[in-house]
Image (cartoon, helix red, strand yellow):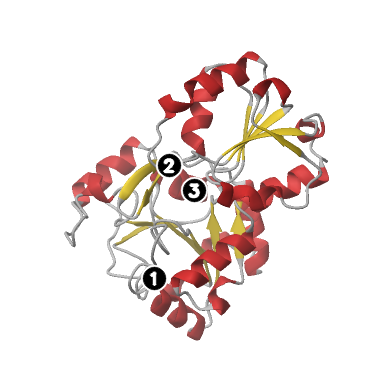
Amino acid sequence: MPPFYPGIAPLSPYYDGFILDVWGVIHDGVALFAGVADCLDRLARSGKRFCMLTNAPRRAYAVAKAMQTMGLPEPFTRDIVTSGEACHEALKSRTDPWFARLGSRCLHIGPERDLSLLDGLDLTLTKNPAEADFIVNTGPWRDEETVADYEPLLAACAGRRLPMICANPDLAVIRGGKRIICAGALARRYEELGGDVRDYGKPHPAIYDVCLRRLGISDRARVLAVGDSLRTDIAGAEAAGIPAALVLGGLHADEFGATAGQHADLAKVAAAATAANVHPAALVPALVW
C-alpha cells in the first residue's frame, strides 16, 4: 500500500523539484481545482522548482493561456512542456527519419482548438484520406464522440497506409465531470487496423528529460512527478526513473470511490496499481498543500 498524505506539504522537504500533470491535477478542462494556486504559491515560496508536463496536443503558449483564463496566475504558467510542442518541433525539424518521409499533406483529426500544433509549419491540410500523406491525431472533433464514430475514417486511412502522429497518448480524460476519449484511444484502434503510429508524450520517458533540463535538476530521486493517471503519469515517471505521487481525485476517481467529496478506497487504489504494474511513491487526494 503506497503511503497516503493529505497534501504536498509533508512530501515537499524530500524533493527539490516537481513535475506536475495538468488535466486532472491542475484543472478538469473547465475550471481550476480548489487549492491548486495556493499549493503552487507555497511551493514557490519554499524555493521549490516546478514545471508542468501535459499530453495536451497543443503548443505550450496555448495551454498557458487557457489556464490563465481559468484564473491561474501567469507566473505559474511559464514552464510548460506539452506533447503538442514536441510534435511541432519534430514536424518542423524533420531530423527523425520517420518524420522526414511524411510528406506535406496532412489530415488533422481533432478540434480546431488544437490547430496551434501546426502553426508555422509548411503543410497543406485536407479532410480527404485519398489526398493525405499522413495523419495528425489530436483527439475527437466533439466531446460526445466514441472510437466507433471514427471507424470509417480510420479504416480508409489504414487502407492507404497513412502514418499517424498521436499527439496525446491518453485514452481518456474527465472534462467538466464527464469522461471523454482522447487521441490515444483512436491511435490504439488505428494500430489494431494495421496503422503505423508514432506517440508523443507520457508515458514515453524521453519527454521527462525535457522537464529535468527545465528544472535544472540532474538527481531524479530529488524530483517528484504528480499525476492522476496510472497508465501515463505514474508509468511514465517510473520508466524515467522518477518517483511519482498519484492524485486520487482525477481520472480514476470513480474507480477509487473518490467522487462527491468521498475518501478513496485505498484497497482499490492498491489493487489498481498492482494491475497496472506501477508503484506510486505516494497517494494524495489532490494538488493541495
Marks 1 and 2: which is nearer the front?
Answer: 2
Given the image, on which type of amino acid does mark 2 rest?
A: Arg
**Residue 49: x, y in percent?**
56, 74
Q: Please state if 142 lies on the left or on the right of 79 as rendered.
A: left
Given the image, on which type of amino acid does mark 1 rest?
A: Leu
Q: Please state if 2 lies on the left or on the right of 54 as rendered.
A: left
Circle 1/circle 3 CB separation < 8 Å:
no
**Residue 285: x, y in percent?**
29, 62
Tell me the SS state at disc 1: loop
Tell me the SS state at disc 3: helix
Residue sitting at x 25%, y 41%: 271
Viewer-closest of 191 and 4:
191
**Residue 284: x, y in percent?**
31, 62
Q: Badge 3 is on which residue?
A: 238
**Residue 4: x, y in percent?**
27, 61
Q: Badge 1 is on which residue?
A: 11
Viewer-closest of 74 and 127:
127
- Sequence order check: which comes first, mark 1 or mark 2? 1
Marks 3 and 2: which is nearer the front?
Answer: 2
Near mark 2 (Cα within 10 A), the count class, few <14, some 14-19 or many ≥20, is: some
- Location of the C terminus by quadrant is bottom left
Q: Badge 2 is on which residue?
A: 231
Q: Residue furthest bottom?
A: 45
Near mark 1 (Cα within 10 A), the count class, few <14, some 14-19 or many ≥20, is: some
Given the image, on which type of amino acid does mark 3 rest?
A: Glu
